[in-house]
């Protein structure tokens, strides 16, 4: 017995033969990304269909990388922004098709609030030279970090770190003089690195470090000695999801259980679309 394919392929010529929002929605439930791009720009696209594609496209992930993403460099990011723009222009149809994003929203990983909050303390100052710090490598660098005798000294080393050796950052965040400001600075530096090709293979090692920082901040393990504000230093939230996209679309019937074939839709219903 043949199983139904997980995702559907169709040509653009076949796509143009679709005549109702219901057919379009049924296609959107299980189609490849390139077809989603056609759907969200279609005059037959309903609000529910666009909303489903929006939340299936992990928009919180695009908020996470939005501060380091430019238009045209990430197709998923561009699709997300296109849907928001088209909603704001009122281009999507109001139909009987329903969609509730609640479950999807609850399961999507978001930027932890803890790393978005500024910490209050003294304004840090620099007295070490960047060129000197960047000549330190391997065991010597580790030893220099371990020997730091104050938060400001550790800050002067950490601010100039540009090393691919991730153990260096683990040493910093576990240091007895690491405060919340230094931890946040390291968090957002590694977050930025995670999107660079140089670090592309290191995400599985970077992620636990980021999670460790978040957990330590939640547990109040870092004192607030120096000041650091992620919203001014890196401005991580370049855009927000409009509130209306969190709402459930009105439900009149369950579409996927009762999609009508094209030849059974009445002329009256056709005129509605």
Image (spheres, grey):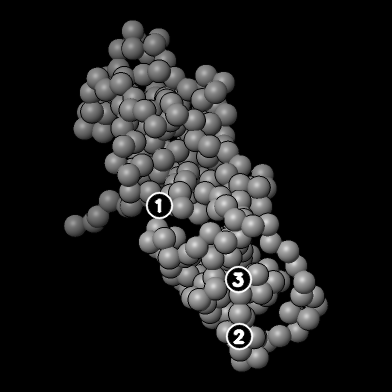
Residue designated by label 1: 109
Residue at (48, 22) in percent of width and height = 92
Measured along the vertical axis of the image, is residue 46 above or below residue 233? above
Q: CA distance from mark 2 to mark 3?
A: 11 Å
Mark 1 and mark 2 residues within 8 Å of each other at the beta carbon:
no
Picture coordinates of residue 259, whole percent (x, y): 27, 28
Residue designated by label 3: 151
Residue closer to the observer: 112 or 171: 171
Q: Is residue 121 left or right of residue 3?
A: right
- Say the numbered circle drawn on residue 147: 2
Picture coordinates of residue 25, whole percent (x, y): 37, 32
Which is nearer the N-term, disc 1 or disc 2?
1
Q: Is residue 100 left or right of residue 136?
A: left
Q: CA distance from mark 1 to mark 2?
A: 37 Å
Residue closer to the observer: 23 or 213: 213
Q: CA distance from mark 1 to mark 3?
A: 32 Å
Q: Secondary structure at mark 3?
A: helix
Q: Callout 3: few (<14), some (14-19), or many (20+) C-alpha neighbours within 10 Å?
A: some
Quadrant in which the N terminus is drawn: bottom left
Which is nearer the N-term, disc 1 or disc 3?
1
Measured along the vertical axis of the image, is residue 15 above or below residue 218? above
- Say the numbered circle drawn on residue 141: none
To which quarter of the image does residue 270 belong? top left
Q: In the image, which is nearer the foreground, mark 1 or mark 2?
A: 2
Residue at (45, 38) in percent of width and height = 54
């Amino acid at each position: 017995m043949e199983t139904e394919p997980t995702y559907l392929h169709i040509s653009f010529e076949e796509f143009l033969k679709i005549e109702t929002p219901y057919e379009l929605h049924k296609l959107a439930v299980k189609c490849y990304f390139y077809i989603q791009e056609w759907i969200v720009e279609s005059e037959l696209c309903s609000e529910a269909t666009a909303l489903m594609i929006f939340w299936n496209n992990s928009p919180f992930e695009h908020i996470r990388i939005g501060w380091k993403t430019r238009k045209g460099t990430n197709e998923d990011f561009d699709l997300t922004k296109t849907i928001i723009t088209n909603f704001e222009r009122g281009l999507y149809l109001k139909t009987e098709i329903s969609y509730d994003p609640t479950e999807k929203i609850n399961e999507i990983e978001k930027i932890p609030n803890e790393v978005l909050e500024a910490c209050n303390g003294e304004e840090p100052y620099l007295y070490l030279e960047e060129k000197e710090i960047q000549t330190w490598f391997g065991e010597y660098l580790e030893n220099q970090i371990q020997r730091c005798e104050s938060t400001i000294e550790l800050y002067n080393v950490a601010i100039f770190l540009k090393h691919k050796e991730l153990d260096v950052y683990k040493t910093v965040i576990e240091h007895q003089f690491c405060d919340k400001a230094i931890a946040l600075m390291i968090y957002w530096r590694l977050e930025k690195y995670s999107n660079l090709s140089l670090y592309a293979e290191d995400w599985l090692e970077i992620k636990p470090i980021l999670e460790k920082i978040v957990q330590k901040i939640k547990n109040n393990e870092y004192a607030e000695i120096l000041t650091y504000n992620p919203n001014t230093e890196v401005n991580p939230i370049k855009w927000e999801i409009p509130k209306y996209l969190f709402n459930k679309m009105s439900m009149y019937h369950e579409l996927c259980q009762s999609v009508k074939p094209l030849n059974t839709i009445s002329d009256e219903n056709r005129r509605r679309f």
